[in-house]
Amino acid sequence: MSLCVIVALLCMFGPTDALERLSDMDEQARDRAFIEVDMQRQRLEEALLEQLQKVLKDRDSTYLGRTHTVLQAISATRADNTVGELVEAVEFTLEPSTFPVGGRLATSAFYPVADTLRTLGSRRVIMGILSATAEEDREDKILRIYAWVLIEILGKDVARLAVERGAIARVPREGKRVLRLLKMVDEEPLLEMPPRKVEKAPVKPGA
């Protein structure tokens, strides 16, 4: 059975009836259907990872621009094979002036990479942040964003425990780096509103 057939069943009969009809299939047909769904998902995740790698090179900071759109797709599909790239680009922000006028937005809306990591919320995200922190000295602003993501996923107490254990499990130099992240978790940082880009006025000839 193809993915198209499964989607058609869901559209025609709704989740409950579709599951009942799937349960009526013989075991081999179900296995084939689930294998195909898994293969389709893997191909989608690979395509999203490839697109993410491309858009992070130019980092279009426009609201609903290329980078933002790919990040939204990753959030919607929970493609956590992208965690490594996301963790390294966590400080990426969108230009506030490109957002629609009116309405109130959470500050996290301007940090789409951090917000995507929060949405993924997987063990892979937590381990990725701990590994990235241990591997090299990170700027305080990046550690604050890492801490924000961990607290959003785990809550402060569990985040603190995870970071503490991450420090203990590493050699002293790496553990010391992770302890800097622990300090940030204790501070419960909030994301800061990114500054608007100020366009320089054109210089008049002869000025």
Image: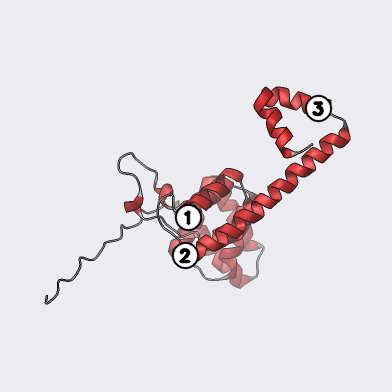
Q: Secondary structure at mark 2?
A: helix
Report the side of 87 relative to 13 (left or right): left
For label 2, the residue is: 58
Q: What residue appears at the point 47 percent right and 65 percent down from the top-left corner?
A: 58
Task: Assess whether mark 2 and mark 1 are in contact (beta carbons under 8 angstroms).
Answer: yes
Inspect the image, locate mark 3, and give the three-letter code of the amino acid beneath it: Ser
Dot placed on the residue nearer the N-terminal end, 2 or 3: 3
- Does residue 34 sit above or below 97 in this rendering? above
For label 1, the residue is: 66
Report the side of 28 relative to 45 (left or right): right
Across and down, in percent, residue 111 comes to 44, 53
- Cα gap from disc 2 to disc 3, whole angstroms: 47 Å
Q: What residue appears at the point 51 percent right and 60 percent down from the top-left corner?
A: 55
Across and down, in percent, residue 84 comes to 60, 60
- Cα gap from disc 3 to disc 1, whole angstroms: 41 Å
Picture quadrant of residue 133:
bottom right
Across and down, in percent, residue 71 comes to 52, 51
Dot placed on the residue nearer the N-terminal end, 1 or 2: 2
In the displayed orientation, state which residue is furthest to the left.
206
Q: Secondary structure at mark 1?
A: helix
Residue 156 can be seen in this image: no
Report the side of 42 relative to 107 (left or right): right
Q: Residues within 10 Å of mark 2 (few under 14, many from 20)?
A: few
Inspect the image, locate mark 2, and give the three-letter code of the amino acid beneath it: Asp
Q: What residue appears at the point 46 percent right and 67 percent down from the top-left corner?
A: 139
For label 3, the residue is: 23
Q: Secondary structure at mark 3?
A: helix
Q: Nearer the viewer, residue 87 or 82?
A: 82
- Does residue 27 sit above or below 193 in this rendering? above
